[in-house]
Image (cartoon, rainbow, N blue to C red):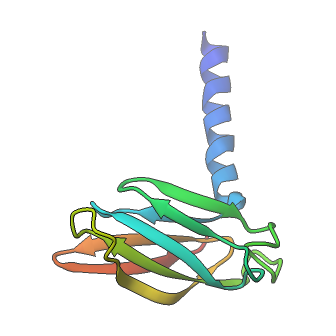
């Protein structure tokens, strides 16, 4: 049983390291759905777009040329994030516009008090 526990711990460690090399992710740390559109660093008519429910995330591999035309882990990609918290009516409010993130990093969308904001991270 000790061997199984060690292999399980090793497997989990590898998965967590792989998560950092996967590519940029956008994490919705609010209580409302957000919509994320890539505005720079992507191919025209391609790139990253997602509707992300509260507590969920979506990602794109930084090696994917549709999402990162610069092709480097530290290339800059930009996003516009909107939120819809008007009870289902299609009325979106901008949280951040053309927000820069490194292609190998991640973006967190948060709310403190009444203020929504974006925060970029890179390791």
Q: Is residue 96 left or right of residue 32?
A: right
The answer to whether residue 1 is above or below residue 90 is above
Residue 70 is situated, as x and y percent measured from the top left of the image, at 81, 83
* Residue situated furthest bottom in the rendering: 98
* Residue situated furthest front in the rendering: 89
* Residue situated furthest left in the rendering: 113
Residue 42 is situated, as x and y percent measured from the top left of the image, at 73, 80
For the point 17% across and 78% down, the residue is 114
| Image quarter of the C terminus | bottom right
Q: Nearer the viewer, residue 121 or 103?
A: 103
For the point 34% across and 77% down, the residue is 92
Q: Is residue 65 left or right of residue 102?
A: right
The answer to whether residue 106 is above or below residue 80 is above
Q: Is residue 65 left or right of residue 25?
A: right
Q: Nearer the viewer, residue 4 or 100?
A: 100
Residue 86 is situated, as x and y percent measured from the top left of the image, at 22, 70
For the point 73% across and 78% down, the residue is 45
Q: Nearer the viewer, residue 62 or 13?
A: 62
Total numbered circles: 0
| Image quarter of the N terminus | top right
Write down the quadrant of residue 105 in the picture.
Answer: bottom right
Residue 108 is situated, as x and y percent measured from the top left of the image, at 44, 70
């Amino acid at each position: 049983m000790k061997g199984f526990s060690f292999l399980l711990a090793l497997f989990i460690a590898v998965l967590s390291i792989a998560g950092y090399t996967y590519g940029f992710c956008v994490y919705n740390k609010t209580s409302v759905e957000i919509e994320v559109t890539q505005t720079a660093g992507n191919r025209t008519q391609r790139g990253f777009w997602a509707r992300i429910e509260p507590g969920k995330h979506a990602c794109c591999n930084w090696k994917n040329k549709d999402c990162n035309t610069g092709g480097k882990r530290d290339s800059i990609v930009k996003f516009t994030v909107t939120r819809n918290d008007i009870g289902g009516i299609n009325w979106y409010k901008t949280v951040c516009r053309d927000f820069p993130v490194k292609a190998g990093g991640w973006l967190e969308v948060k709310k403190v008090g009444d203020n929504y904001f974006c925060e970029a991270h890179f390791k």
